[in-house]
Amino acid sequence: MIARAPSSQRKTYVVDTNVLLHDPNAIFAFEEHEVVLPIVIIEEVDRFKKDLTEVGRNARQISRFLDELRLDHGIPLSQGVPLDGGGSLRVDLCENLEITWSWAGPKSRVDNLLLAVADQLNRKAGQVGLVVVVTKDTNLRIKANALGIRAEDYEHGKVEVDELYTGQNELTVSSELLDSLFADGEAPSEHAEPLAANECLVLRNGERPTQTVLARVGADRSSIQMVKRVKEGVWGIHPRNKEQYFALDLLLDDSIKLVTLVGKAGTGKTLLAIAAGLAKSADERVYHRLLVSRPIFPLGKDIGFLPGDIEDKLNPWMKPVYDNVEFILDSRVSGRSGKNRGYEELISQGLLEIEPLTYIRGRSIPHQYLVVDEAQNLTPHEIKTIITRAGEGTKIVLTGDPYQIDNPYVDSTSNGLVYVVQKFRDQAIAGHVSLSKGERSDLAELAAELL
């Protein structure tokens, strides 16, 4: 049974628009406490309802939630209605507010009205900390603090990147276990505590510490399997460090339906994912095609509308994907005679498809190897939308760097990529690897470390 705060210590959370647009379910996340929405927040949400973006969908969803609460209880929301979690929700009409701050500017400004509502409730509460402004706006939190009002970021669903599951572990094991691994490729786990399913391991011989073996926990969590060595490479791509070996092992295992690869620029996330996808689609024909996609967010100021048909418009956005495919194709024929077939030929044969994520809603994607690059720019809801598109026989690979985010509505702790890593960390059909060593070039690695 969940312990509830006594009524004298129940808090009042004044919630900002950006929180609702980030997560429409936020109004249900405050348990037994009171949620207050100044009426100007609802007006601000209304401005976004026609957008065709994720923000627009969230605006429409929060409106539906409020309308259902209105219908279910049959009383004005300004009087307050109960929520399933034991708390309540109330729409504040912003009446009889006194804004005496000389810096406040126009009284109609939404931020100032929200602070005025919180200030009024704070004075009525008579106890510091019982009224809390919840906003993702850093400057609004600073202003609230200056006024003596407690302010917090919306923490629900956040995952601290420094504490993110890495998908790797190092264990000291017996010589007998290593001998069994070399002989059979699999051995029972000696570890007293259960390891995560598909967790990657560096096994160190307890009698000869210099001897190490790369392995992986089985889906049943009770066995250990050797990581397969890829002697001939995968479409000309050879792993250069243990993390890349781990990544390829997960990418080439057909029983693992979801793989997440997290790492800084130059660690080989996208390159390995595309190479494995081509091997599984074009060579082994396990999947009908390799589908590569990425969200469309510019780095820096956008250059505006692009001329041409849809292929011309998408080409600049998809250029990083084309670069990786061309590099793989060049590596595949390096040292051989004969002409390399370009990615256009793979596309014309139906083995490769490259497209943005814009039109994925409503689709069903069966028997495909789907790589979603730059997944750190997606919200948890968008990631859910993508993964739920997976049809029978489809494998999904999500790659990205949580520290390189271009989407203004997510950050390193609230983006969809880290959310998936945390939620799927012990699922038998999912695997994860964090890559840290850059292999693009010495210059790229140095820049990633110093800049």
Image (tube, helix red, strand yellow):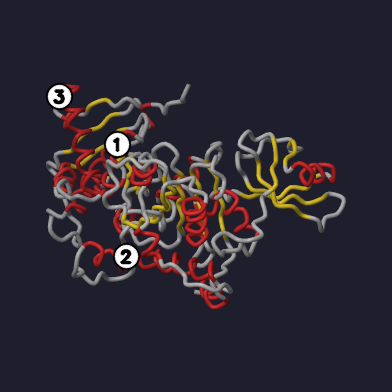
Distance from disc 1 to disc 2, alpha carbons, whole Å, reads 36 Å
Residue 198 in sight here: yes
Is the residue marked by circle 3 packed among few (<14), some (14-19), or many (20+) residues within 10 Å? Answer: few
x and y percent of residue 128 in the render? 36, 43
Which mark sits nearer the N-terminus, 3 or 1?
A: 1
Mark 2 lies on a secondary structure that is helix
Distance from disc 3 to disc 2, alpha carbons, whole Å, reads 50 Å
Identified at 81% across, 50% down, the residue is: 205
Q: Residue furthest bottom?
A: 443
Q: Residue furthest right?
A: 207
Vertical placement of 277 versus 198: above or below? below
Res 223 quadrant in image? top right
Identified at 63% across, 33% down, the residue is: 220
Mark 3 lies on a secondary structure that is loop
Name the mark on residue 334: none
Name the mark on residue 317: 2
Can you identify the residue that label 1 sits on?
27
In-front residue for pair 338/28: 338
Can you identify the residue that label 3 sits on?
75
Q: Amino acid at mark 2?
A: Trp
- Disc number lying in front (3 or 1): 1
In the visual, does 116 lie left or right of 10?
Answer: left
Determine whether label 1 and label 2 are within 8 Å by CB: no
Determine whether label 3 and label 2 are within 8 Å by CB: no
x and y percent of residue 141 in the render? 33, 54
